[in-house]
Amino acid sequence: MPGIKKIKIGCDLFLNLKLYHLPEKMLLSLQKQYPDIEIIPVNVPQSPNIQSNLDIYWGNRITAEIIENCKNLKWIHFGSVGTNRARTKSVISRNITVTSSQGLVIAPMVASALSFITGLARGLHYSYALRNKYCLNRENFDAIFDEVQELEKQKILIVGLGDVGQRLAKVCVALGMEVIGIKQNISEKIPYVKQLHSLNELAECVTDSDFIINLLPLTTKTEQIFNNNVFAKMKSSAFFINIGRGETVDEETLISVLKNKSIAGAGLDVFAVEPLSVNSPLWDMDNVMLSPHVAGLSSKYWERQLELFSFNLQQYLMNNFTDMRNIVDMSKAI
C-alpha cells in the first residue's frame, strides 16, 4: 500500500522463551506481506522503552500505563487467551479493539487436562515419587491401592466452558465420564454436558464431583473463587486441576487441604505467583502433579498465531474492525 504512512506495531514477543519469541522467519514474512507496517520490539529487556505513537500493540505484557501513554492505539492483540491486562476504563472509553488468541491452544490445553486427569486417577504422581526415592515396586505402590481410580462413570466438573472446556467435555464423555459444567450463559445448551450451572453455584457443584477442572480467566469475579468454602465441600477422593489462572485459587487454603488429605490430590499448571517459589510446600507433596504454566504449549503455536494475526492485520488495514477474529468484549467481567 504505497503512499500510506507506516503503521507502527509495538511487539513484546521478543523474550527468551520460544513461546514468547516471534520467530525471525515469521517476522520477515509479515514485513514482506505488509510492507507498510513497522514492527518495533517494545517492553522487553533489550528494548524497554515504549513509543507513544504506536497504532497496534501485539503481545502479552501491556500495562494500563502503556495504554494511557499511547494515544494513537487502536488495536491490542494478545498472544494469549487471557486479556485481563487490557481490562481498563481507557480501553473501553477509547473504543480500542482487543483480540485474543482464543482457539489457538485448544488442542494442547485439552491434552494437558487429560494428562492430569489420567495421571492422578492412575497414581502416576505416586509412581514418580517412588521413582525419585529408588523404591518403585508393586509392594510400595500398594499403599495407594484404594485411591487408584477408573474414569468410567466418574463425575467431572468443568469450571469455565469455553472452547477448551467444551472440547474437553466431548473427550471426557468418550471416556465414559459424566460431565457437569459451569458457564456464564446457562441458557445455552452445550453438547456432552449433562448439567449446566452458573458460577455462583460452584460450592454446591463440587460436593459430588470426582474431578474439578478450573479453566476460568482472571477477573474481579473469579479472583480466589476457589476458596475455603469451595475446597471444604469437595470429596476426600476428589482431584482438583488448575490450568486456568493461578490467582483464581486461594493457594494457602489449597495447600492446607492437600496437607490434610481433605482432597485426594491436585494437578497444577498455574500458581498465585510464578514461577512457583522454591519455598512452596507444593514441591514436596506426593499427591500433587506440577507443570510450569505450559498447558497451552505446542510446536504448532506460532504457525497458528501468525495466521490469526495476519488475518486481523488485513482487516485493520482495510479499517474493517468488525470482521476481526476473537474480538473480546472488555466490558464483561467474564
Image (spheres, grey):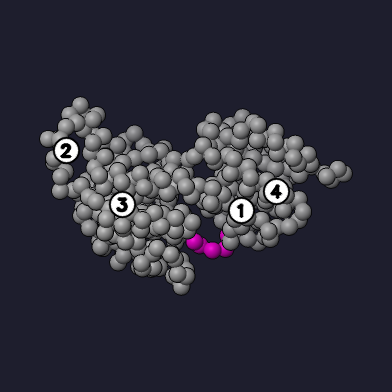
Which residues are drawn in magenta? 330-334
**Residue labelled with disc 1:** 99
Q: Earlier in the sequence, mark 2 or mark 3?
A: 2
Mark pair 3, 1: CA separation = 30 Å
The residue labelled by disc 3 is 240
- State the mark number for residue 73: none
User: Does the rendering let one see residue 176?
Assistant: yes
- The quarter holding residue 166 reads bottom left
Q: Nearer the viewer, mark 2 or mark 4?
A: 2
Of the numbered discs in the image, which one, if any, rests on residue 313? 4
The Cα–Cα distance between marks 2 and 4, rounded to whole angstroms, is 55 Å
Gap between marks 3 and 4 measured at Cα = 39 Å
**In front: label 2 or label 3:** 2
Mark 4 in CB contact with mark 1 (< 8 angstroms):
no
**Callout 1: 10 Å neighbours few (<14), some, many (20+)?**
many
Type of amino acid at the residue the image marks with label 2:
Phe
Q: Are marks 2 and 3 in contact (CB under 8 Å)?
A: no
| Marks 3,1: beta carbons within 8 A | no
Secondary structure of the residue carrying numbered label 3: strand
